[in-house]
Image (cartoon, rainbow, N blue to C red):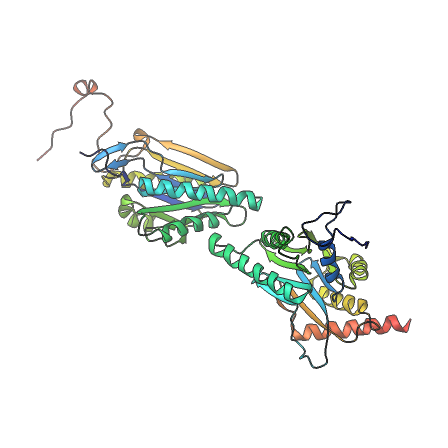
Amino acid sequence: MDTDAPHSMGTTIIGVTYNGGVVLGADSRTSTGVYVANRASDKITQLTDNVYVCRSGSAADSQIVSDYVRYFLHQHTIQLGQPATVKVAANLVRLLAYNNKNLLQTGLIVGGWDKYEGGKIYGIPLGGTIIEQPFAIGGSGSSYLYGFFDQAWKEGMTKDEAEQLVVKAVSLAIARDGASGGVVRTVIINSEGVTRNFYPGDKLPLWHEELEPQFSLLDIPSSPGPEPMNI
Amino acid sequence: MSSIGTGYDLSVTTFSPDGRVFQIEYAAKAVDNSGTVIGIKCKDGIVMGVEKLIASKMMLPGSNRRIHSVHRHSGMAVAGLAADGRQIVARAKSEATNYESVYGEQIPVKELAERVASYVHLCTLYWWLRPFGCGVILGGYDRDGPQLYMVEPSGISYRYFGAAIGKGRQAAKTEIEKLKLSEMTCRQGVIEVAKIIYGVHDEAKDKAFELEMSWVCDESNRQHQKVPDELLEEAKAAAKAALEEMDAD
């Protein structure tokens, strides 16, 4: 096991617009091969007061891109005299992603709120395309969510509906994708500001044959065992 | 407010004892001697007009444009040395396209004005450059609504409701101040601008002139363009009629 190997975030990342803002969500697993280097990482990174980015792929690459964009946006905000728009933030991200496509391996979802356009989500996958979407999914875990979103997504959700959708989706992906796991983090951005939420494993719904959580090895002998199967 | 700056006016990097840079003031004189240029901000957009003094009867009408589009949403009217003006317009166009390719959105008019002003100012800092001999009125329509800026040869730039440069600027400013701009649409503004320009034109000193006008407003879909021909003709007719009325008194 090479713990010095490049860290990648298998990841499930999601960005969803709702009536009044956006909800960003992510899992928290950073892996080096099969070793989980960080089981509680924060993949939703701040670019400005009103714009955040979900990072997936190479941890180093996504961090460096976020750092550069944060720096450029800061200068831009000073020059402009008002907060930057989500579109500008996303454009700066994609210029870096596109122009360095041979060197980088990171998929990003930029989401935020500004006074001109309201809540917006921009997906910036591997090659550096930029696409504005009502919702975006990314990372290895997202493969398991395409069908889910086709069925569950609807226009004009409330803030709570949108957050519940994101939490459910990330937990579904965590259940099926080995490279995603840990806790679910969400960030809600709207005209009022930014709210961070945290859903540990015991707050997430169980899916299909997953076991109830066992909190201590000492508890196992005293609790009733599983029901025998009826063949 | 003229005064001779003998000895202190040979270089733009020299201050006079009373704190003036005479070369910049002389540059402003070049602007003052040019045909009048005015710009007004109406409630739904900007209108700009130029009194284009015709040097020769051989010139084709419509040539020697004094108003240029800098980007889809903004335009610039130039007074003073025409060649200097071309440089400024070229720089403004370049700043606008560069901003869009980096930030992915149209350059805000405020930012454009600051960059143009900064460039004009730059040329007042080095002895091997001379200041631009032209003033510029910049009108544009962005997310924050219509905005009008004026940049002087010194590099100063302010935002205005109405601005005028050139020969007839004093009279033009007086006329502009009489207008109720916040209640006026650009369609009405075009007529008013034409009247003002015809009004300040000095028949005795300068012979012929051609009126050039542009606008950027809701009606033009927030694009900077020449005022449509029929509206231009309507404006010219109204301006000539207003002149006759004045003369009749």
Q: As rendered, which of B67 and A134 lies closer to the eye? A: B67
Residue farthest along the bottom direction in this orientation: B58
Q: Can residue B57 be spotted in the picture?
A: yes
- Image side of residue A78 versus residue B34, left or right: left
Quadrant where the C terminus of chain B lies?
bottom right
**In the rendered image, which quarter is residue B64 located in?**
bottom right
Please provide percent x and percent y for residue B189.
Answer: 72, 64
Where B27 falls versus A231 (above or below)? Answer: below
Q: Quadrant of residue B238?
A: bottom right
Residue A83: percent from left, percent from top: 53, 43
State the image coordinates of residue B120 (x, y, percent, origin top left).
63, 55
Q: Residue furthest front?
A: B7
Identify which residue, A74 or B41, lies in the foreground: A74
Tally of marks: 0
| Side of A64 relative to B95 (left or right) | left
Q: Position of residue B59 (x, y in %)?
A: 68, 79
Q: Is residue B183 visible?
A: no
